[in-house]
Amino acid sequence: MSEFVPKPLRYNEGGNVHMDFHGAANTTIDFIVDRFGIEAMHEIFRKVGEDVYQDLRRHLMAGDRDELVRHWRHFFDREAGDYDIAVSDDEVVLTVRRCPAWHHVLEIAGRVSPHFCDQTIVTNAAMAEGTPFAIETVVTGPGACRQVIRRRA
Amino acid sequence: MIPSDHFTRFYNEVFKFLESQGEAALESYFLEISKNQEKHILDLIREKGFEGMLEYWSVIRDEENCDLDLGYDEDRFEIRMHLCPSLTKVQDNDAQTWGRYCDHCAGWIGPIMDKTGYHLVYDVIDRTKPQCRMQVFKDEAKAREAEKDVRLLMGWPGHPVKQG
């Protein structure tokens, strides 16, 4: 019997990684918040969660949280993040001890936007909106967070 | 974390928002990104000229997995992008591609060339195709001459493309 091979992720990048994009994201966040306000920045992140990550949303909508877990593993591995993921029947907990994005920005820019982690908080919430799941994102320290997928009550 | 691999798709959403706020908002953002990029490239250009450009874009070629040729001679630095990973990702996207996505490259590079005394000629060729040709000249007259041979010339803040 052949082993089950899951379909590739919708976005399944390989090759090298350009970490400096996180610096451009940090600059962008400061720019948008300074000129247009935090709500405009959040609206852009909601668009990312709803439109760019439509495929992850479709999986969540169908009751499948595994695709998001695969997405987390793929991209945190690519960027050498220090993390683990605990999966149980009730919840999935992603514990990020060292966020590669946050720490790279600190290294190259010396300062991380106070709104930098909103990209995770708001994008996660938007991805899960209207699905059977909620994703709670809690910043637990500088460049560290916990992201929890739970079935809505 | 929005993965660095997905930055361009985030960028694409930022551009759509800024376009809705008007052209001045977009130009202001290009200048902000240009300023951000200065820390990676400005000293290289000031200290090493074309060789510094070669160093910077060689790293970009490798880290961003670009299919491009680059090089320089006495007069001119040139990049021929055969397959741009940035536009390719934005087009391989469940969100809609912003039609002027390619404008951002000249948008941030142009101000840096102005600041360092070089003359940029940026031919996007076709905004729907992930290929372009960038030339940087020491001599302004040679840049203006090269502009006659482009298909879709890009401008940047403070340097609009002359119509007609």
Image (cartoon, helix red, strand yellow):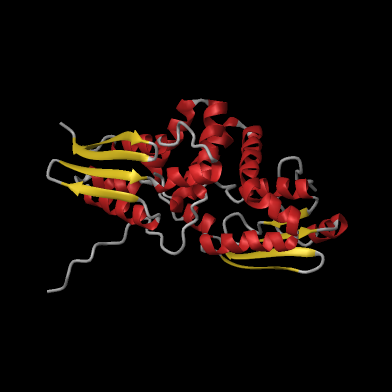
Tell which residue pokes out farthest to the right in this image: B141
Question: Which residue is depicted at the point 57% across and 27% down?
Answer: A35
Q: Quadrant of residue A130?
A: top left
Question: Which residue is depicted at the point 44% across and 42% down?
Answer: A102
Q: Position of residue A32 (x, y in %)?
A: 54, 32
Residue nearer the viewer, B34 or B26: B34
B73 sits left or right of A99 in the view: right
Please tell me whether residue A131 is drawn above or below residue B152 in the rendered image: above
Q: Position of residue B105 (x, y in %)?
A: 63, 51
Q: Is residue A33 visible?
A: yes
A27 sits left or right of A143 in the view: right
Q: Is residue B12 visible?
A: no
Q: Position of residue A54 (x, y in %)?
A: 34, 46
Please tell me whether residue B104 is drawn above or below residue B71 in the rendered image: above
Tell which residue pokes out farthest to the bottom in this image: A1
| Total marks in image | 0
Question: Which residue is depicted at the point 33% across and 50% down?
Answer: A82
Residue nearer the viewer, A85 or B138: A85
Please tell me whether residue B149 is drawn above or below residue A62 in the rendered image: below
Residue nearer the viewer, B37 or A37: B37
Q: Quadrant of residue A8?
A: bottom left
Q: Position of residue A16 (x, y in %)?
A: 46, 62
Q: Quadrant of the N terminus of chain B?
A: top left
Q: Quadrant of residue B131?
A: bottom right
B31 sits left or right of A144 in the view: right
